[in-house]
Amino acid sequence: MLFPSIFRENLFDDWTDLPMFGGFPEIDRKLYGKHAAHVMKTDVREADGSYEILIDLPGFKKDQIGLELENGTLTVSAAKGLDKDENDSSGKLIRQERYAGAMQRSFFVGEQVTEADIHAKFEDGVLKVTVPKQEAKKLPERKLIAIEG
């Protein structure tokens, strides 16, 4: 990255966002700005009879993740806070960069899909959601109407 300052949202952005200090890849900075760490990184794979949605949620526990299906839209949400205690046996906390907050992402899976059809598993920081493929609705045949006159 030639000019890291191009990607700054304001003059007071943290200097640790620079790549040499482990900042975000250039593409994430362009797409999401300084909030790149708070985006659910997702892969969608097509299998024979289903779709697999793989979502990276590192640092989350299973009870901090929710799945909701409403009107054919599957919404994945995750929320967590940090401990309020700033001191521990190893010393005073000076800087904290771990994520605390909430995020969500929605996917249209079809109005025929029910919650019983969807299977989810959370393992090693990755949520795997399996959604069955639905047959495409057959469109009605085109019918012409005669015009008199």
Image: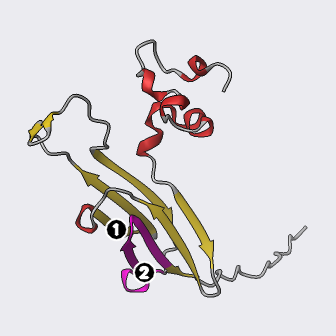
Gap between marks 1 and 2 measured at Cα: 10 Å
**SS for tag 1?**
strand
**Residue at left 40%, top 22%?**
14
Q: Position of residue 120 (x, y in %)?
A: 39, 77
**Residue at left 45%, top 47%?**
39
Front-most of 90 and 99?
90
Q: Position of residue 123 (x, y in %)?
A: 38, 72
Amino acid of disc 2: Ile
* Picture quadrant of residue 118: bottom left
* Picture quadrant of residue 6: top right
Give the residue at the far right of this rendering.
149
Looking at the picture, does residue 6 appear above or below residue 61?
A: above
Coloration of the structure image: secondary structure
Name the quarter where the C terminus is drawn: bottom right
Name the quarter where the N terminus is drawn: top right
Looking at the picture, does residue 27 appear above or below residue 133?
A: above
**Residue at left 28%, top 44%?**
101
Residues drawn in magenta: 113-130
Q: Position of residue 51 (x, y in %)?
A: 57, 77
Disc 1 target residue: 67
Looking at the picture, does residue 76 appear above or below residue 123?
A: above
**Residue at left 30%, top 48%?**
102
Front-most of 86 and 67?
86
Q: Earlier in the sequence, mark 1 or mark 2?
A: 1
Amino acid of disc 1: Leu
Disc 2 target residue: 118
